[in-house]
Structure formats: C-alpha cells, structure tokens
Amino acid sequence: MTPNQLEHTTAVLADMLTFKQPADAVLSAYFRAHSKLGRQDRHEIAETAFAALRHYQKIAAALRRPHVQAKKAALAALVLGRSVNISRIEALLEEEDKTFLSQLKARKSEFSDGLNTAAELPQWLIDTLTAAQQSESDILAFGRSVNRPAPLDVRVNTLNGKRDKVLAQLHAEGLAAEATPYSPWGIRFQDKIALNKHPLFLDGTLEVQDEGSQLLALLLGAKRGEIVVDFCAGAGGKTLAVAAMMANKGRIYAFDIAEKRLANLKPRMTRAGVTTIHPQRIDNEHDSRIARLHGKADRVLVDAPCSGLGTLRRNPDLKYRQSPATLAALQQQQASILAEAAKLVKNGGRLVYATCSILPQENEQQAERFLANHPGWVQLDCAELLSAAKVPLNTGHYLQMNVAQHQTDGFFAAVFEKQG
C-alpha cells in the first residue's frame, strides 16, 4: 500500500466505521468524488476497508472509537485482514503505529477478548443467537463462515443458453468456473472477474445471482402462461429467474417501494430478452394498486425485507447497522407484507416466503404465525419440491441454506398452498 492509498483508505474508514450508511454506498460515493483514482488504487482501498469491517471486533477491542483513529484502523486491517507483514509497510508507519501493530499481533484474541472477537460478531447478535439456542461453537462457526469474501455466483439465462455449453466456453477462455451443486442454472467463479465486461453478460446469457437465491424460483415453480407476482422485487434478480423458468410466457408483476431499484430492473429485462415482467412501484403493502390482483395470482413470491444477516460475506457492515430495535420493526413489516401478499393468491395457488436471514424470528416464527392466523393454507415440504425439480438438497420442510455447509448466502424459505 502506498502513502496515497493509505490516506484515501483512512478517509473512507472515517466515514464507513460510523455505520450510518451502507459500506458499499460510502465507497461508491467516495470513488465518484475522487474519479482520478486508478483501478489498482480503488482495489487496495476497497479491499482494506472491507478487511477493517470483517475484523472490526478485534480492531475495536484494541482501538477506542476506530472511526476517530481511522489510520490505525486501516493499518490494523492490513495486518489482521490482509495478512500484511509489519516490515512490508514500515515506510507508512510512525513509531506509535509500530507499537500499536506489534501489540495487536501479540494479542491472544481468540477468546481472551470474548466470543465476539473470536467470531467477529457484535454482542447484540451473539445474544440473539444464544437466545435461539445456538451453542458457542455454532456461533463461532457461523461468524467464521460469513467473515470470508463470497465467490461470484451467476445464473445461466435459459432463454439464451445452456449451462454445459456456457461452462465449456468459459473453460476454453481459461476461466476457473464450475457448476453449482444445487441450482441447475448456476455457475460459480472462485476468483473475481470483470463479469460486467464479458460478452456472455452483455448479451444477457449470464446474470449475477447467488445460488441460494436461484433456488427460490424453483420453489415457486411457476409455469408458462401463469400470473405471478414478485411482491418485493428489488432490482429483479429473482424476477428474471422466474421469467426464464416460464420460458418468457405469462405475466409477472414486479412490485417494489423503491423507484430506483425497479429502474435497475428495466435494462436487465432488455439484456435478458424478457418481455413478460411488468414493474410497478407501490407505496407500501397496502397500496390500492395491488387490490386488483386479489385472488388472481397463480404464484406469489415474498422475498421480504429482512436483517440481511445471511449476506454478511458481501455486506459485513450489516451486523453493525442492525440492532434488536430494527429487528423488531422488521418482524412487524414481514408479517404485514406476508398477510397482504397472501390475498393475491388464487385457490390452489402457491405462496413462497423467503428471507436472506438466519434468525428464527424472521424465518420459522413468521411461517408458523402465518399458518396460525390464516386457516385454509397448508405448508408444502421444500425438500419434496426440490426433489421433484431434481435438486439434490434436503434441509427439511423449510429451505435453510447455511453459509458454512452450502457455500451460498444464508437463505430461508417456506412454501404455502391455498386450499380451494
């Protein structure tokens, strides 16, 4: 790392470590404001900043108010998170920095500073997981599994190509790519590649989508010609997977409260060659524009707003931007959205409730509450549905993707059917 790169990393961390905004938003805004930074500079700054997030508990245990001492936080991230030898960065260090880093390396931080430093999880989350009957070893395994960068998963758009042919092409180009073990459409890259410049991305054959997310489309099981609603569509990754599964025949309503997210879906639709998706911004789950679909949808997908704790490999700052208070508010919102989305399903239709969380309060407890409050609905077995789709995965009645076990983001899904 050069002195200039360290200076920029320090400035980024002074903002990022307040946890007032998403880390990727802080980084994007900084790079926009400093547009002359080169590709290597941006790489060094981003890697070190995210290393600081991944090792924040150890840094905070050794450094009071890290955002105020952002240079030391950046140096600690290089040593702890990027395994840089102190001697290699000696030119960047003042005497005080050398002393700090030497003490940091000497620290026996496995359990001497508590489970939070060993697992790199904040105390509120450890308390929440403990209350959910998770053991210390389970919590430690979870913390370590989400503290590594995620590989890049993509989905082959079956409107444009077949996975085996795409893999053969990627291998011919010398790229290290492999078929994902569960999704029939998934490909995994262990190394980072500039996918957005690759011809297969530009022509809509490949879409970035975690393998766990791809499985939600299989659980929804949409068929050609059906009416489908993606109730919380976001930028439309799952919507596009459903459209491809329906062979671009039928009608898909993509609802979301964020105009910006839906705007991102439109160019993705064009690139993928999908014409069946109808994006619609709504004010909330009670929006009157939803009422016209009451009892008309064959399938409804609710990928509910959640804590996002299953995505910590990609978004390590989330564990510091969530709290018991935000979790309680999310649970209320999830229950309300699920109840409203259920009204759209016709008799015999299917409703999928999903989150990218690992907490039972957002997952099993929401599913159980829904069934208790909605007679006339039955729960379907996710293992049976996946088996019928020739997916070799059995996590029981619910889909529960575990980062350590399945190498995907942490995903949960429950599937319900409305009895006619």
Image (tube, rainbow, N blue to C red):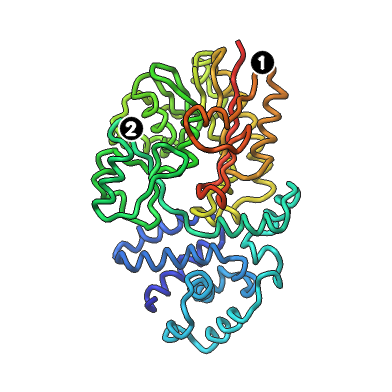
Q: Residue 50: which disc?
A: none
Label 1 secondary element: loop
- Going 65% across and 66% down the picture, which residue do you hit? 117
Closest to the observer, 314 or 254: 314
Spot occupied by residue 397 in the image (x, y as percentages of width and height): 63, 32
Which residue does the numbered mark 2 point to in the structure image? 158
Q: State if disc 1 and disc 2 touch (CB < 8 Å).
A: no
Residue 59: image quadrant is: bottom right
Residue at the extreme top of the image, as rendered: 420
Spot occupied by residue 113 in the image (x, y as percentages of width and height): 70, 71
Tag 2: amino acid: Thr
Graded by Cα atoms within 10 Å as few (under 14), some (14 to 19) or many (20 or more), the crowding at tag 1 reads few
Label 2 secondary element: loop
For the N terminus, the image quarter is bottom left
Spot occupied by residue 26 in the image (x, y as percentages of width and height): 46, 57
Q: Is residue 369 left or right of residue 196?
A: right
Report, in whole angstroms, how far the alpha carbon at label 2 lies from the one at label 1.
35 Å
Relative to 318, is 206 above or below? Answer: above
Which residue does the numbered mark 1 point to in the structure image? 376
Graded by Cα atoms within 10 Å as few (under 14), some (14 to 19) or many (20 or more), the crowding at tag 2 reads some
Residue 206: image quadrant is: top left
Spot occupied by residue 378 in the image (x, y as percentages of width and height): 65, 21
Q: Is residue 221 left or right of residue 353?
A: left
Q: Is residue 95 left or right of residue 244?
A: right
Q: Is residue 110 visible?
A: yes
Q: Is residue 334 visible?
A: no
